[in-house]
Image (cartoon, coloured by chain):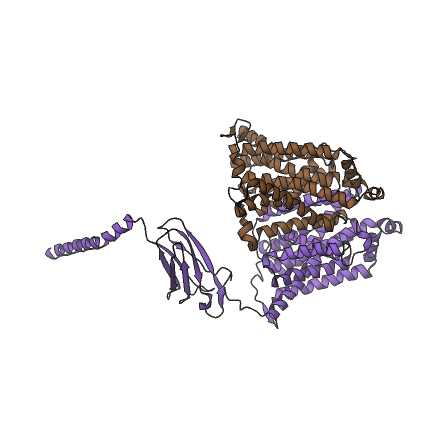
Amino acid sequence: MASSFKLRTLSRSALLFIIAITFPLFLASTAHAEPATKLYGVVTDSEGKALPGIGISVVGPDGFSAEITTDAEGSWEVPIVSKGTFSATINVDDLPEGQALTNPEKSTVKANVFMLGVDLRLLFPVGPGVVQASLLERSAQLTLDGILLGLVIALAALGLSLIFGTTGLTNFAHGEILTLAGLLTYYLSAIAGLPVLVAAPLAVILGAVISGFLQDRYLWKPLRRRGTGLIAMLVVSIGFAIFLRYFFLFIFGGDTRQLPQYAGQAGLELGLVNITPKSILTSAIGVVFIIGATLWLLRTRMGKASRAVADNPALASASGIDVQKVIRAVWILGAALASYAGVIVTVNQGVSFLMGQDMLLLIFAAVTLGGLGTANGALVGSLIIGLFVQLSTLFIPTELKYVGALIVLILILIIRPQGILGKKERIG
Amino acid sequence: MDFLFITQQTLSATIGVNTIIFALAAIGLNMHFGYTGLLNFGQAGFLAIGAYSVAVPVISFGLPLWVAFLIGIVNSVIFALILGIPTLRLRADYLAIVTIAAAEIVRQIARSATFNSTLGGSDGITGKFGEEFFALNPFKSGLNTPILRFNANDLWVVITGWLLVAVIVFFMWIMVNSPWGRLMRAIREDEDAVRSLGKNVYLYKMQSLIIGGVIGACGGFVYALSRQSVQPDNYGTALTFFAYTVLILGGAARVFSPVVGAMIFWFLIVFIEQVLRQGVTNDLIPDWLIGVNQVSQIRFMLMGIGLMLLMIFRPQGIFGDKKELALDAKA
């Protein structure tokens, strides 16, 4: 009984003691209306492991400045006493070998302190460091990337160019053929559970049937029958593209999704460049497709007929060529090629409803560059655009790479309006 | 369903700010496409230039607003020259591709982080750059009647905007009925015939591109002022396409048709959107079919189909004359 009483007085006096020493502090902080505030953060590497000993300096208003290094848990904090804009800079040189900021331009982070008492957490995302490659290595990698991009553009551009050549249609809905094939690949593999190696060819076949045969049969052929003008058909294709784009958004949603297989495949180091096996395979098949299409144009009866129709439909028709049959063949081939381009993009970068739209201007640029309506012009133009888009990032910010390609398009049209391989008569 | 609310929203939109913006964009296109036969797919670029020219000089350089308007007009003339010099000698479809590319260049540069400090990057510019304009607003309170509803600022934008549209339509009427206007239509019908009469077709096409572009930039002024902000992604290719829809809906090569087209366009859009929205929120339309966030997607899908059907079955639009149409010309 006595001991318990003693304990209670002890704890009471301890409590009083604590209040006694903390009260002045409490009083002081309310008097100046400065609740304790800190900027803080934890620096971890790409695997979430703490990075100790990283220097961080903070500067703020009224000459405020502080230097600190992260502790053993990788965390740091800097108490601050005034409102305003603070900026924290991480000392990149302190990061261990192989680790770097995921965005090298974000070594300084700004923090706006509107209200004291609210701690602000600042992030410095760190990832596996890209050791700054030499100019030679970067050029080699970008050249490879450019050729791969050029290949995708070429597959899509060939169809666009063939369809333009035979029917005169400037098809603004061509990009949606890529998107449809990408979505089909996704649905067949991720939802229906087919392996990608089965889903992708199936998507190309379905693309050829839906985007090629059915689209021509039920949309463009009736319009040609009605005698709809070319510009009117161009506007129809814009309406169709808008419809399809938002239809895809409606059923698929706005995010970019990866296929269930091969999504995070590691790249292979081949000399100066890094390339994933899936990229090698899809691109090799793409080259085969292009060679096949070229041989079809040059060697087969139907291919020759299609070139005759492109040259002069009336004369071709008079010499016994079934023009409608040729156009149907061109639509099916063009849609198959563009569908495969969509499959390449989907396998390597994932699929979103905007995929085709994003490619459309590059496809147009390539086709215009090479000369509208010429098949080999489309190939040359695609390669140039692909290489230019990638290699230009050596000199201009990556986000402006498409701007560079579009400017080149305009410049070439000033010098050579018919395109690189176009015929003179094609200028207005 | 709240039919009174739907009526109020729809009628306000029919004569509202967006109608004015699209009417101006389409009047410019009417000059290009309706009268001269130029297939300009870069009208969004002209609007973007107008909008940024209002915001940037005032916010970044502290210039007065009327100077910003002048800068906007000068900039749109320069853009028209840059666009026209390489492309006006080309065939119609080349022009379409190059102009669409040029408008994308404008948008991508505007949204790039490289020019973040002046152009605001992908967030665009938000600020009180229109204060001088709104200081002139005589209306202290907005309009709130059962059929129309505008707040004070919108009311001021709508009244001045319609005045601007009236002035521009008046000048368009004078221009297209002058010998100059007849020459433009002659270029649309047969360039070579005009050339054989000793006229410099290239120069006339350039004049058309500049005039239509400046009118488009005026649409950009209204766009920026009405919202006191400029968002780069509002000036994408879709804006141009919808301006074409407006023009074709009203009927190309008629002075009033872009205005009427814009009114019908926004009447339909807001009406459909409000009805769908009320249908979804009141559970008249099941959730698995259309979610609340999917209403605007349905709206765009209908717009796409509408443009196709219009072009196929009534390319002359509501008021257009089928004879006055470059649409059937071989590209």
Q: Nearer the viewer, residue A275 or B125?
A: B125
Q: Is residue A188 left or right of residue A154?
A: left
Tally of numbered discs: 0
The purple-tinted chain is A
Q: Nearer the viewer, residue A362 or A330?
A: A362
Residue at left offset 66%, top offset 34%: B168
Q: Seen from this angle, which residue lies furthest bottom?
A: A271
Q: Is residue A287 positioned above or below B154 on the image?
A: below
Q: Is residue B44 positioned above or below A178 on the image?
A: above
Q: Is residue B41 positioned above or below A121 on the image?
A: above
Q: Is residue A378 left or right of residue A19?
A: right
Residue A227 drawn at (x, y percent): 80, 41
Residue at left offset 81%, top offset 57%: A303
The image quadrant that residue A263 belongs to is bottom right
Residue at left offset 56%, top offset 66%: A266
Chain B visual colour: brown
Q: Seen from this angle, which residue lies furthest left?
A: A2
Q: Is residue A150 left or right of residue A128?
A: right
Can residue A243 be seen here? no
Residue A305 drawn at (x, y percent): 83, 55
Can residue A127 be seen here? yes
Residue A49 drawn at (x, y percent): 43, 65
Q: Seen from this angle, which residue lies furthest top?
A: B146
Residue B163 drawn at (x, y percent): 62, 31
The image quadrant that residue A144 belongs to is bottom right
Q: Nearer the viewer, residue A222 or B47?
A: B47
